[in-house]
Image (cartoon, grey):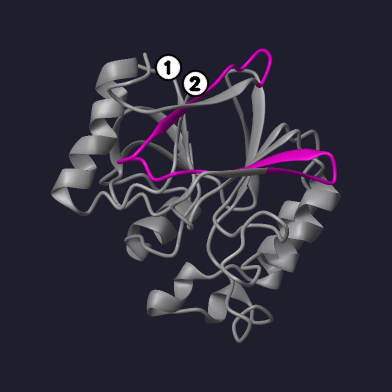
Amino acid sequence: MLVLGDAHASDPERREALLDHYRTLEPDAALQVGDLEHYELPAPTWFIAGNNEDFDVIEALRAGETAGTRNVHLLASTVATVEGVRVAGLSGNHAPTKYDLPRSELSGERRRHFTHEDVERAASLSDVDVFLTHEAPTGLLSYGYDPGCEHVDDLLEAVSPELCLVGHHHRHREATIGGTRVVSLAPAWERYYTLDPETLAFEGHDPGTDG
């Protein structure tokens, strides 16, 4: 299974880098951790919304509509079985001033955020193997401060996945947090990853140097 970090594929060069991974690996399925910005893909792809998306498309996908898209499936506090793996995801990023609002009150670009409703719904999911999130948990990254989000900490404790894949930060970092292997993914134009559905073995690959 192909796994990809942030794509920012509204940029033509980055879109080509994204699609090149599909052409090279010809995957049966793919996972992607947000900032996708391109919604017509060569293989079925389960993704979470990041903070850079076409939010009209994202809202349509939330509503179960697929017009203008191909092979994309949004995980928005939902879970899907992908090649036998239970994959769940929290779409959006955190804004403290919007967190306590109902999602129905978010409009325009503010639709990029998750709310308490989204987190509560995600926390109720069960039997999750892999969890996708755009925000990192605490204890994974440092910029002289910890950019992690405590709401993601709470979700990992509630859902207890074997593997958590993180976008947004554009750098590869790994940690074990509360028994979960947590990996912050490099962006898709730098690296791709593979996940073995049977063992959940997870590996990174540098294009041109790794087969």
The x, y position of residue 38, in whole percent, is: 28, 47
Which residue position is annotated with label 2? Answer: 1
Q: Which residue is mark 1?
A: 28
Q: Is residue 101 shown above or below 39? A: below
Q: Which residues are magenta?
A: 175-200
x 59%, y 67%: residue: 114
Q: Nearer the viewer, residue 127 or 59?
A: 127
2 horizontally vs 86: left or right:
left
Q: Position of residue 130 (x, y in %)?
A: 67, 35
Q: Secondary structure at mark 2?
A: loop
- Between circles 1 and 2, the one closer to the viewer is 2
Q: CA distance from mark 1 to mark 2?
A: 7 Å
Q: What's the residue at 41%, 57% (across, down)?
A: 58
In the rendered image, residue 70, in percent from the top left (x then y), is placed at 30, 36
In magenta stretch: residue 55: no
| Marks 1 and 2 in Cβ contact (< 8 Å) | yes
Q: Residue at x 84, y 51 (%)?
A: 157
The amino acid sitting under disc 2 is Met
- What residue type is disc 1 on? Asp
Tell whether 169 sits left or right of 154.
left
88 left or right, relative to 64: right
> Which residue lies at the image location 46% right of the left edge and 69% below the top edge?
112
For marks 1 and 2 on the same chain, the one whose residue lies earlier in the sequence: 2
Magenta-drawn stretch contains 191: yes
Mark 2 nearby-residue class (10 Å; few <14, some 14–19, many ≥20):
some
- Give the answer, above or below, for where 162 lies relative to 145: above
Label 1 crowd (10 A; few <14 / some 14-19 / many >=20): some
Query: What is the secondary structure assignment of the residue under circle 1?
Result: loop
Which residue is nearer to you in this view: 117 or 136? 136
- The reply, left or right, for residue 116 in relation to residue 33 is right
